[in-house]
Amino acid sequence: MGIFSKFVAKLKGESTADPLDWKVLEEELLAADLGPKLTAEILKSAQGLKGADALSSLTQILNSHLSIKPRALSDANSIGVILVVGVNGTGKTTSVAKLANLLHSSGNSVMLAAADTFRAAAVDQLQTWGQRIGVPVISGKDEAEPAAVAFDAAVAANESQVNYLIIDTAGRLHNKSDLMAELGKIRRVVEKTLPVCEVLLVIDATTGQNGIAQAKIFTEAVDVTGLILTKLDGSARGGVALAIESALDIPIKFVGTGEGENDFAPFDPESYLTGLVRD
């Protein structure tokens, strides 16, 4: 990413930065999707940076804007039920499959629920992924009630005593009341059988500030416990991760960096910040 790399390099060679340098940095931060509010806060904090201390001091400033909430999946007493939410087009269904693959590869038994029933392609996609990575997928008939599929999956997961049940939910976003009603119903019917331990929201990193707006709507509609950030592929626009955590104090738990089933990993704040401040 290296959003700050040129700026840090200049500070190392001089005692202070001139007004033009600050203007250039501001433009780079805005272009990197940090947003005007966070950009202004970072610039204000960075005014005193000098020489050799610039790199470590800047890293500390950026780190202060990341969430301090746990990034690991919550421990479940028995079966970890994970609801995955997000608008269509963010890579939600693919992220469900990649998370399942990550957990399955780590020795966990996993079951998937294809509750995004309003898109036949999403059900087919998840079933294909399930066959590829070797995990069972619970689905219903065409246009089945999402909550019914989720309930059947919870019952099946409970009977099989798998380690994790991951539920792919519908990505429609008509308005907040519809969203709240649909996700609320899914959660209620699932929790008749098993408690939900995580609600993960999938956000496309390339949507920038619009991703923050989506996150705000979902957090108002459902208790989001963590984020999955997709398409965080090392581009200069990766600053959106910092912006989202600063604005909402919701931890990014996983990132998707490519199309392959293994292009998915826990979010590493230290590596992320290193990428922001260096080439």
Image: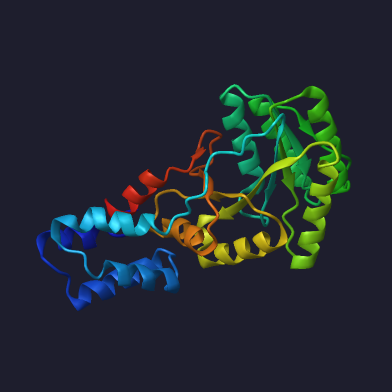
Q: Which residue is depicted at the point 23% across and 54% down?
A: 55
The residue lying furthest to the front in this view is 77
Residue 254 in percent (x, y) is at: 53, 43
Q: Which residue is depicted at the point 76% across and 40% down?
A: 195
Q: Quadrant of residue 133?
A: top right
Residue 117 showing in the rendered view:
no
Closer to us: 174 or 212: 212
Residue 25 in percent (x, y) is at: 29, 69
Q: Is residue 52 found left or right of 232 in the rendered image?
A: left
Residue 175 in percent (x, y) is at: 75, 68
- The colour scheme is rainbow
The residue lying furthest to the bottom in this view is 19
Q: Which residue is depicted at the point 62% across and 64% down?
A: 216
Closer to us: 171 or 124: 171
Q: Is residue 65 found left or right of 219 in the rendered image?
A: left
Closer to us: 5 or 187: 187
Q: Is residue 239 above or below residue 188?
A: below
Q: Quadrant of residue 59?
A: bottom left
Q: Is residue 169 found left or right of 246 in the rendered image?
A: right
Residue 34 showing in the rendered view:
yes
Q: Is residue 202 above or below residue 134?
A: below
Q: Quadrant of residue 28?
A: bottom left
Q: Which residue is depicted at the point 61% across and 61% down?
A: 215
Disc tally is 0
Q: Is residue 196 found left or right of 67 in the rendered image?
A: right
Residue 184 in percent (x, y) is at: 80, 54
